[in-house]
Image (cartoon, grey):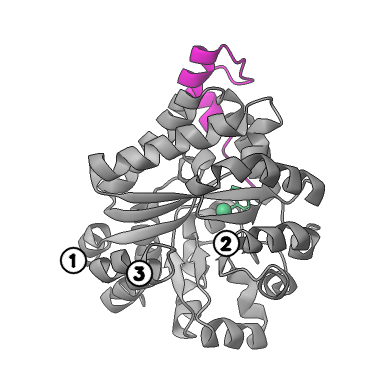
Amino acid sequence: ERLPGLLRAMPKAELHIHIEGSLEPEMIFALAQRNGVPLPYASVEELRRAYAFTDLQSFLDIYYAGASVLLHEQDFYDMARAYLARAAMDNVAHAEIFFDPQTHTARGVHIETVINGLHRACADARSSHGLSASLILCFLRHLSEEDALATLEQALPLLDRIVGVGLDSSERGHPPEKFARVFERCRALGLHVVAHAGEEGPPAYIWSALDVLQAERIDHGVQAVHDPALMRRLADERIPLTVCPLSNLKLCVFPRLADHNLLQLLEAGLAVTVNSDDPAYFGGYVNDNFTQLFAAVPALTARHAYQLAWNSFEASFAAEADKRAWH
Ligand code: ADE
Ligand code: ZN
């Protein structure tokens, strides 16, 4: 079969990866030991067995528990270093990496510790792997807008190390408009703006991510298929969707990969990309997302593969000169 080889070899950008979701169980145990943090699991195997999710919230509970082993700048560096080395093996040429500072500052870790460790790993990836990487600070939507504003305030001295902001965590009951003021502030600061919307939540959340937050990309967005007017808007304005097939499978957004609607979104003219979301938890990095989806949906061809790779660079916040070089 030539298609899996093409999917693995083609250069691509990854635009939807939560760095805390790249923390493999082995590294969780190693960092727990290094930092003296107790874990409610006896072994790597027992932790891995807990990765049986029924929806987004059942995953988030375990994901935040796993992140509790991260304390020092070196921990954040080691985590991002491991992801970037793994991404380079998948021929990722450019990565835009989400991180959740509030998960760490709530435990007393300073935001500089988080950002400096991640930023140093991104800088080193250029020399080690020829991979360009940038950071997107995500606000946790289950917390208040005041908490998000305070987090932005803490990040102000470090904004040169961040390309944009995003919105993640528990979607239902936390519509984008809850964060209208903090996103307005971020746009005024010249930051790029993205938001998770339409992962589990309704098309209305995608509308308000676009109209209220003025999101430049929608993370997930797969629920858009239920709203024809929204589908036309996303296609007409070429608003990228960062889709994560294995995540959608593991969080029961679709019962089987064969039922995934990525092809439908692509054929409707949307700027779809393929990404890993939380690869350590969902059973695969970006190439696994490509190969497993293409194996499950035989109508996906080499033409679609090229389109998806092209879209990933087009949708990125990389400098135009870099984009031209990748094209
Ligand atoms: N945080 C990490 N992964 C996430 C996802 N898939 N949706 C919302 N928040 C997240
Ligand atoms: Zn995500």
Q: Is residue 199 above or below residue 159?
A: below
- Measured in 3D between alpha carbons, the distance from the residue under mark 3 to the one under mark 2, in whole angstroms, is 17 Å
**Mark 3 and mark 1 residues within 8 Å of each other at the beta carbon:** no
User: Circle 2 is placed at which residue position?
Assistant: 190
* Disc 1: CA contacts within 10 A as few (<14), some (14-19) or many (>=20): few
Identify the mark at residue 320; answer none if there is no mark: 3
Check the image and report above or below for 146 versus 119: below
Q: Quick one: which residue is furthest to the left in this view? A: 2
The earlier-in-sequence mark between 3 and 2 is 2
Rendering coords of residue 301 (x, y %): 30, 76
Q: Which residue type carries mark 2?
A: Gly
Distance CA(mark 3)–CA(mark 1): 31 Å
Residue 66 image position (x, y, % from top left): 58, 30
Q: Which residues are magenta?
A: 28-55
Residue at left 59%, top 62%?
193
Some atom of ligand 2 lies within 8 Å of the CB belonging to the residue at label 1: no
Badge 3 local density, few (<14 within 10 Å), some, or many (20+)? few
Residue, disc 1: 2
Mark 1: which amino acid? Arg
- Depth check: give the residue in front, 22 or 109: 109
